[in-house]
Image (cartoon, rainbow, N blue to C red):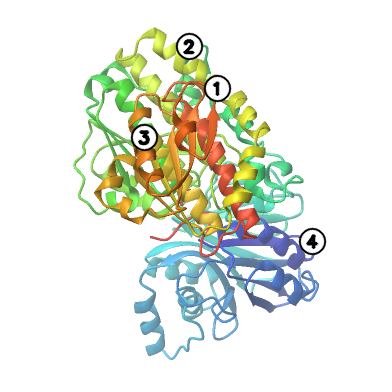
Amino acid sequence: MCGIIGYAGDKQAAPLLLEGLTNLEYRGYDSSGIAVLNDGDISMKKAKGRLKNLFELTGGGNALKGTTGIGHTRWATHGEPNDVNSHPHLSGSGQFAVVHNGIIENYLDIREFLIQKGYKFRSQTDTETVVQLLDYYYKGDIFEAIGKTINKLTGSYALGILSVHENGKFYAVRKDSPLVIGLGEGENFIASDIPAVLKHTRRFILPEDKDVVVVTSSSVDIFDMNRESVTREPYTVDWDIEAAAKDGYPHYMLKEIFEQPKALEQTMGTRLFGDTVRLEGEKYAKGEPNPALKAKDGFRLTERDLENLNKIFIIACGSSYHAGMIGKYFIESTCRVPVEIDLASEFRYRRPILDKHSLTVVISQSGETADTIAALREAKRLGSRTLGIVNVIGSTIAREADDVLYTFAGPEMAVATTKGYTTQVTVLQLLGLYIAEKKGTISAEKNARYLAEIAALPDVIRGILGNQTQLQQLASEYFGGDKAFFIGRGMDYALSLEGALKLKEISYVHAECYAAGELKHGTISLIEENSLVIACATGSELFDKTLSNVKEVVSRGATVIALVTKNSSGMEKEAKHVITMPAMSDETVPCAAAVALQLFAYYVAAQRGCDIDKPRNLAKAVTVE
Ligand code: F6R
């Protein structure tokens, strides 16, 4: 996890680094630090805890003078969060300072090697071995030192490097960790993510693995491992600064919940045309993709691909996995192709059976989740065709998957995903309908109905957002409880999993989800007087079954909040509260219903005074296993 930033320009670096880190804090927030180069001296400040501590310590950055610098916000992996383990790390000689995002897997071996050579270590981090190794290899040629250092590293890294020998300049190099280069006027940046520097530029370069990047105020030069100069095409992002700002909302999460109608319109915009889905995009329509983005948006199945396709694997983590579950139910029912779904962390080690006749769909908002990347690589290794459903443009998964369908949700800053999730569900459903139509496994009438309902989702969600008072009231009534059970069947089970995750991760209420049919196999023994049960029963097909389960928990004293659709009846007699969604197909309503669960979770967390955008122990992009 962690976020890194670097600046070289004509302004004071420290305030700019702090400002950039503010937009990276979602990646990790247990400590932060900056280092600034000034006339051959590196000055450095670090602070445990939230970034505001570093702001205070440095007087908003004014305490450090110099126009070149690097910064870091940390999500601790090696060593507890404290000032010593915070980045930047200095080499023992003080010649180098390094910020790092990623994991150096062989750091203990390197540390041992360096201790033998007389190096002393101050921290428990893997990163300190990198900076000491640089120092060890430095014999007057920093390129050589960087080259030798990265040849010795196993693992993932995005590094920003300052050297006392190189005024007005810093270096960056990445492997399997995100890094963008922002091209400004008289100033240039590096960052883990675009929003960190969006205020200063919209032009970015995405360096390749092991490119060595040399950044000054007036130049960005990139070299490969053979020290040959290489060209990486810049591209321009069309996000505006507001897209990455809170825009008057108290939290990014609430803003992003409210952005869902627009996000979904963007997701569908270039793909849904009346009763047809087109996924080919520019990639297949106009030949070669833009080399700067490597895998530009687009997916195509030929007749031959269709004949050969025998199984689809869906792989993801967390909420993306929950979106994938909705995708599995939808694709199986519409395309009649078996779909296996796996958590990425399980898939990568379970020796899965797949081959060139399978399609592996990996889903990731960030495109940087370590387990999902590893699963993608494993699927590729086994010969499967791969498709990434990704939000962050140019992220590792977007670049490495054979094809990519971007969700186009815009930047998602809150740690808990909202618009990332609903746009993933929508892309999966469009994918299902694209395949089903080609395979002839869906009637024209059903296809048209689904597509009309998907197209109407932004307005349906606007309606839910406009009627949020009921959810606010429910949150005020129940925020004090310490546990909640979510139940559902079929797609409602997938929806309940997401509802429970949203609630637990931001409010710390112990929320657990069970397939409603499983209650009697153990869980029901936990139900007692006043247990809170949130029953998702939006699907008409399994409504009566879930209603029976609701009766079972009510008769054991539970208080039930039920989520249903307009045309269901009978729930109001059992549940204490009923949240009603518009009448829609069983398959399309979960995406809308998720918004109600997001709002409930948000308002419970707000009532409990939680740090909603940055829940404890979490980070937005999980770049460690
Ligand atoms: C929960 C949440 C996480 C992510 C998971 C995967 O609100 O955001 O569960 O869904 O960490 O992240 P991505 O989608 O970036 O691979």
Q: Nearer the viewer, residue 408 or 400?
A: 408
Q: Nearer the viewer, residue 193 or 460?
A: 460
Mark 3 near mark 1, Cβ–Cβ under 8 Å? no
* Residue linked to disc 2: 275
The answer to which of marks 2 and 4 sits earlier in the sequence is 4
When asked about the image quadrant of residue 16, the answer is bottom right
Which element carries disc 3, helix, strand or loop? helix
**Residue type highlighted by circle 4:** Asp
Q: Nearer the viewer, residue 142 or 389?
A: 389
* Residue linked to disc 3: 546
- Which of discs 3 and 4 lies nearer the camera? The answer is 3
Q: Is residue 280 left or right of residue 459?
A: left
**Residue type highlighted by circle 3:** Thr
Q: Which mark is residue 270?
A: 1
Q: Nearer the viewer, residue 239 or 573?
A: 573
Q: Residue at x 53, y 35 (%)?
A: 578
Mark 1 Cα shell of 10 Å, populated few (<14), some (14-19), many (≥20): some
- Which of discs 2 and 4 lies nearer the camera? The answer is 2
Marks 2 and 1, how far apart at CA: 13 Å
Marks 2 and 4, how far apart at CA: 54 Å
The answer to which of marks 3 and 1 sits earlier in the sequence is 1
* Residue linked to disc 4: 10
